[in-house]
């Protein structure tokens, strides 16, 4: 039994095992004040300014959905600018030594987790690292029993996209990306999955300087090459500009992209240029299950706007935080770790600390008022995503961005 399974067992979160009375356990909450302190490391974003607020809205909505009696979770939020290691370390020292928190939640790049765990692990403080899923943790991080990873699975979904494209579009695929987006492990996950599925990458187009000729040059080359599909790893205006150029050139190659290009606000902004694109997502607003309907309805009622993916990420993080705080309750100590969330059932891989849920294959199509909508084509159950897709470390080139994806 590995150290993570031991930790989860003693925290009351073990899969299929009951908690026992042993010296090693989660730091007890403040019983005198009946509160449980959770420190939140929150980055900012200039390009997607709504995401930090969405994340916190989701956490608060989750925590407010539980009965008022019992131990209350007190949130202490610390800004970490764009989420770089130096800021995160400084704030973690404060949260641990001055605020004496019981739990750390970091909306941070996974690569920063190792630095802050050098502070939180000796103090036996469980730490939830949450982000878009742009990078995989390394082997040292997954062996750390105090680290839990709750993400939007960008790496996993990129790998699933590569496999789907080879099997359904053809073996010859091209990648279109930006200097920023290509600086994360997601691009390696896609490339590896394509290779493992018997496909080849015919060309990789990287927009290094955001010049207009990049789009014209790229679409012209795609038109001339014998490519059978495009993986678009861009976001925001950059992605929209490429899709506009794609439309002007009347290209008919199928396009697979990320869930962030197909966010509802992006669909409203991009209009018809975002019709008929595929993406793999961990969540879309239209998921037809009771938990999602409850989440979407409650979010709109409380905040007056639709939830986005980071709202969902915050909500799930809140559910996990509550489970950690409530580790002495009988239903946790006697049952497998699972949470019925808006995406479906979440489970924890005890070998890696990664929270795993289903993926959804989606395609956009014209909906009401000619605005594209996301339509779910297939639900994909996944397991052992880390073991199956974490092969980027075998490559000579490795990503360098340390801010969480889209927080720049």
Image (cartoon, rainbow, N blue to C red):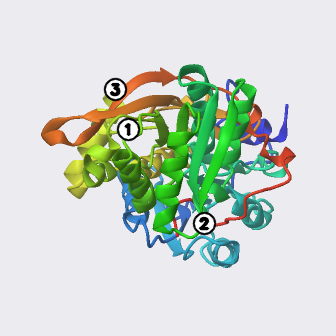
Mark 2 lies on residue: 208
Outermost residue to the left? 369
Determine contact: label 2, label 1, CB under 8 Å: no
Q: Nearer the viewer, residue 17 or 81?
A: 81
Q: Please, is residue 85 above or below residue 161 in the view?
A: below
Question: Residue 95 in the image: x percent, y percent?
Answer: 62, 73
Secondary structure of residue under mark 2: loop
* Secondary-structure class at tag 1: loop
Mark 2 or 1, which is nearer the eye?
2
Q: Position of residue 346 (x, y in %)?
A: 54, 32
Is 43 left, or right, of 396 in this rendering? Answer: left
Q: Nearer the viewer, residue 262 or 87?
A: 262
Residue lying at 57% horizontally and 47% vertically, measured from the top left: 151
Q: Badge 1: few (under 14), some or many (20 or more) residues near its Cα, within 10 Å?
A: many
Mark 3 vs 2, N-terminal side: 2
Q: Earlier in the sequence, mark 1 or mark 3?
A: 1
> Which callout, 3 or 2, points to the residue nearer the camera?
2
Rendering quarter of residue 197: top right
Cα distance in 3D space between marks 2 and 1: 31 Å
Circle 3 SS class: loop
Residue 395, image x and y in percent? 84, 48
Residue at the image point whose x is 52% and y is 56% from the top = 217
The answer to whether residue 65 of the structure is visible from this angle is no
Mark drawn on residue 289: 3
Category of crowding for the residue at label 3, using alpha-carbon neighbours closer than 10 angstroms: few (below 14), some (14–19), many (at least 20)? few
Q: Residue 172's image quarter?
A: top right
Judging by the rendered image, the residue that carries numbered circle 1 is: 284
Nearest the eye: 86 or 197:
197
Residue 203, image quadrant: top right
Residue 149 visible, this angle: yes
Residue 221 location, x and y as percent? 55, 47
């Amino acid at each position: 039994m590995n150290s993570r399974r031991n930790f989860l067992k003693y925290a009351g979160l073990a899969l299929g095992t009951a908690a026992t009375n042993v010296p090693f356990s989660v730091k007890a909450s403040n019983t005198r004040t009946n509160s449980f302190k959770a420190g939140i490391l929150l980055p900012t974003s200039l390009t997607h300014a709504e995401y930090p607020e969405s994340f916190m809205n989701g956490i608060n909505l989750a925590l407010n959905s539980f009965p008022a009696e019992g131990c209350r979770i007190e949130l202490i939020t610390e800004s970490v600018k764009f989420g770089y290691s130096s800021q995160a370390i400084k704030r973690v020292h404060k949260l641990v030594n001055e605020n004496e928190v019981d739990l750390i939640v970091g909306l941070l790049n996974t690569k920063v987790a190792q630095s802050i765990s050098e502070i939180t692990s000796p103090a036996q403080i469980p730490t939830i690292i949450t982000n878009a899923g742009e990078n995989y943790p390394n082997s040292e991080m997954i062996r750390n029993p105090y680290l839990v990873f709750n993400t939007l699975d960008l790496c996993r979904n990129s790998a699933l996209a590569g496999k789907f494209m080879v099997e359904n579009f053809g073996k010859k695929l091209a990648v279109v990306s930006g200097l920023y987006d290509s600086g994360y492990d997601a691009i390696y996950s896609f490339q590896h999955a394509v290779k493992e599925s018997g496909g080849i990458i015919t060309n990789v187009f990287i927009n290094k300087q955001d010049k207009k000729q990049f789009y014209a040059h790229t679409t012209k080359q795609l038109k001339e090459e014998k490519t059978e599909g495009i993986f678009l790893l861009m976001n925001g205006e950059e992605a929209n500009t490429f899709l506009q150029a794609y439309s002007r050139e009347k290209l008919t190659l199928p396009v697979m992209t990320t869930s962030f290009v197909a966010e509802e606000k992006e669909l409203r902004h991009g209009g018809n240029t975002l019709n008929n694109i595929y993406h793999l997502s961990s969540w879309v607003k239209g998921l037809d299950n009771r938990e999602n309907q409850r989440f979407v309805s409650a979010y709109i009622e409380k905040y007056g706007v639709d939830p986005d993916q980071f709202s969902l990420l915050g909500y799930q993080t809140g559910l996990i935080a509550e489970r950690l705080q409530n580790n002495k309750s009988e239903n946790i100590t006697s049952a497998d770790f699972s949470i019925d969330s808006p995406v479906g059932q979440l489970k924890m891989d005890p070998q890696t600390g990664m929270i795993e849920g289903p993926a959804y294959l989606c395609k956009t199509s014209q909906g009401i008022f000619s605005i594209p909508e996301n339509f779910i084509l297939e639900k994909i159950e996944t397991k052992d995503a880390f073991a199956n897709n974490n092969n980027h470390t075998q490559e000579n080139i490795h990503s360098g961005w340390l801010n969480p994806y889209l927080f720049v």
